Image (spheres, rainbow, N blue to C red):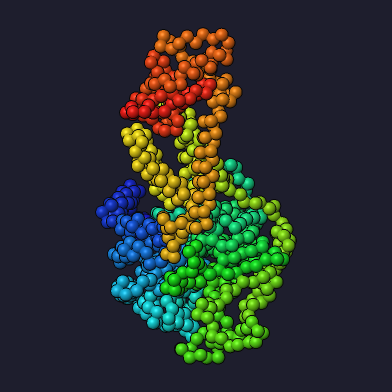
Amino acid sequence: MLASIRNDLSPRFSHMTTPMRQLLLLLLVSGMAWAQEIVPQSPSTASKEIVVVNVTNGLNKSNAKEAFEIIEELDPNQTAALILQIHCLMDTNWDEINLIMGGLGQLEGIPTYAFVDSMAVDAGALLAFSTDTIYMAPASIIGGSPILGDGNMKAKMESFNLATARAVAMSKGRDPKLVEAIWNEDLEVTWGEKIISKKGDTLMVEAQDAVSEQEGKRFIAEGLARDVYALKEMAGLEGTLRFTNADDPRAYLKDSPLDSVKMRETSFQDRVVVIEIGKNDLVNSARFDYMRRVLERAEHEKAQAVILDLNTPGGLAWHTGELMMRTLGKMETPTYAYVNPSAVSAGALIALATDKIYMSPVSAIGAAAVVTPFGDLSDDVSRKINAILVPLCRSVARANGHDPLYATKFMIPEKAEGEEKSGDSLEETDLVVEEQDDGTYRLKKKKEGDVGDLLSLAATEAVDPWREAAPLAAGIAKSLEELMEKESLDGEVVLAEPLGFELLAQWVTRFSAIILLVAFLAAQAELRMPGFGVFGFLSLGLFALFFFGHYAAGKLIGFEMVALFVLGIVLIIVEFVFFPGTLVSGLLGFVCILVALIYTMADGVVLPSGELSPWKLDGNSVGDALWNLTVALGGAVIIGILTARFFPESPLFKRLVLQSASAPAGPSLPDLAPQTESTSIERAESSLIGRRGEALTPLRPAGTAMFGNDVLDVVSDGEYLAKGAAVEVTTVEGSRVVVKPRPGANS
């Protein structure tokens, strides 16, 4: 600008002296600087920030309030755009989602984008529709599901949701019918000649369909983006990405809290990473976190390939969905599933999330219907779950080059041809032929419970076309080595193994019974001794290790069970110190400890909403927890009894204790001067039996008591005796002096 002014004035400059020219230029520069100070200058778009806000709603997590607070504080002068990274499972926390939608409506001068990171379901879909532009991850879904409940409650939810949907649609210029179809099952949604959602179903759109185009217009989303960096490039946004409550997908955090003390890890670069998925790996949320970390490492360190070695009967549906969409579905590193020998239920769905599937010679894959540990889902819950999970798995399968038909048939039972009923009449298709005991055949009506069959494929079937679909598996391999040879993978094989706190969690959960056994024995030894010493600290340390290990394993939702355990200990202390012998406080404390230990070791049940129940437990894991507790408590009791009976007479104990000290001397006792060692001990023992005294310390059951002027180490006959209790010696066995409460005396 200064140069152009100078060029315009150059003819006049030629008639000026040099000092005059310099003075004029100085005045021009000063004037421009002054003008810039008094006229506010808007920052350039490149200097503004693109704010990324994560909105999560599901699996017992919701950060919607936090997201709303971030949106409220956005400054249009500093913000080039807002990207909502959405991962919402179902219609929970509606009030919080509504807060965000209200915040979006108040934003002025800030363009808004939705990035459907995995699922934008129900309230999540409405949140995405509340933005100006939508982008979706390649293996994601957007839409709604049937509203649970009946009667007035269901009518209220439907009325409120549909009104909100219409308001959002009109505010963003979208077709109200499209948004209303999220919950309205009476609407049919078409796009061109294709029926996207037929009557009787709620709208649920897979990513590949969401970006379909008609006459230059996209259906729902403007494009498929792997992450927010890709979204920024596709949308042509300028500015620096600022991640608020969201993680930077390209900033791999190698040291997570659970990895802070892990051992040195082998690099995955140019190597083939093998992750073994066994029968118990998909029923523990901590294992999903571990697999996600390994997959992210493989992607970050540019591994040659990842092979999932599958031998699993299934596991947690929602955690499986998250692993498929948010990790496997976005990987650029080639991924392979090796069914060795079974990939059932969740295992089959994970296989669909890989690039290629190989089968071992004798193997099977399929049968992925969603059930609970308590049996089948109710009809309305089943419809809602399938309305979300089936499109999710179809989308992941399509993104990885598999025919989505397999996902549908794996998850939804298919009735035999003609099995559907037509009214109450007995059509020919309602009848089946059954062989009778006498060898004859009769026509019978199909049973009401016939729900059809789930698709499962043997190895040889998986490599052949099924109906109109292409083969599911790329081939049959006898071993991982043969799979690698067929895929020309020549990198060094690295078997992924848990390290650091992950390994600690694995060992603690595996050897819970032994840890509890030693902890109970240490607590028992501490109770037998006055004061608080080594055994007490050992017991507390082992219990702390037990709870921390299970927390690291993902079995503790919070610290409620730890608090319950501490409460149990406090109640037992109250019993011993303040109300000895009442048993009420002690028994209540013991029950609190048992409940805390069982709930810590058992796995919670993932509810149909996708949230982890804090109180409902998986039946099989409860059995394992009870077994561990039985071994620990039973072993501690047995070892305690044997120790009390035989340890005082053992050579080790006699070497630790001065034997002659047990024979008291004094004017109140007869002369015990021995003629021989044996007669001295016999006289001492006989003189003690029947003596009466007073407990100087609580006997729990061991402690000290005073008999006249003599203080002896004694043990009660099993009953707790408080300090000051009147006692009487009943038995003397070597150094072991046994007492009982004195009859008729107050203790």
User: In the picture, residue 716 is in which quadrant?
Assistant: top left
Residue 640 percent coordinates (x, y) = 51, 35
- The residue nearer to you, when weighing 666 against 559, is 666
In the rendered image of this protein, does residue 541 appear above or below residue 667? below
Could you tell me which residue is drawn at 40 percent across and 54 percent down?
244
User: In the picture, residue 222 is in which quadrant?
Assistant: bottom left
Could you tell me which residue is drawn at 30 percent across and 51 percent down?
33
Residue 80 percent coordinates (x, y) = 38, 60
Which quadrant is the N terminus positioned in? bottom left
Q: Is residue 207 visible?
A: no
Residue 300 is left or right of residue 150, and the answer is right
Residue 440 percent coordinates (x, y) = 65, 87
Which quadrant is the C terminus positioned in? top left
Residue 558 is left or right of residue 677, and the answer is left
- The residue nearer to you, when weighing 137 against 719, is 719
Q: Is residue 609 visible?
A: yes
In the rendered image of this protein, does residue 291 appear above or below residue 226? above
Could you tell me which residue is drawn at 42 percent across and 60 percent down?
611
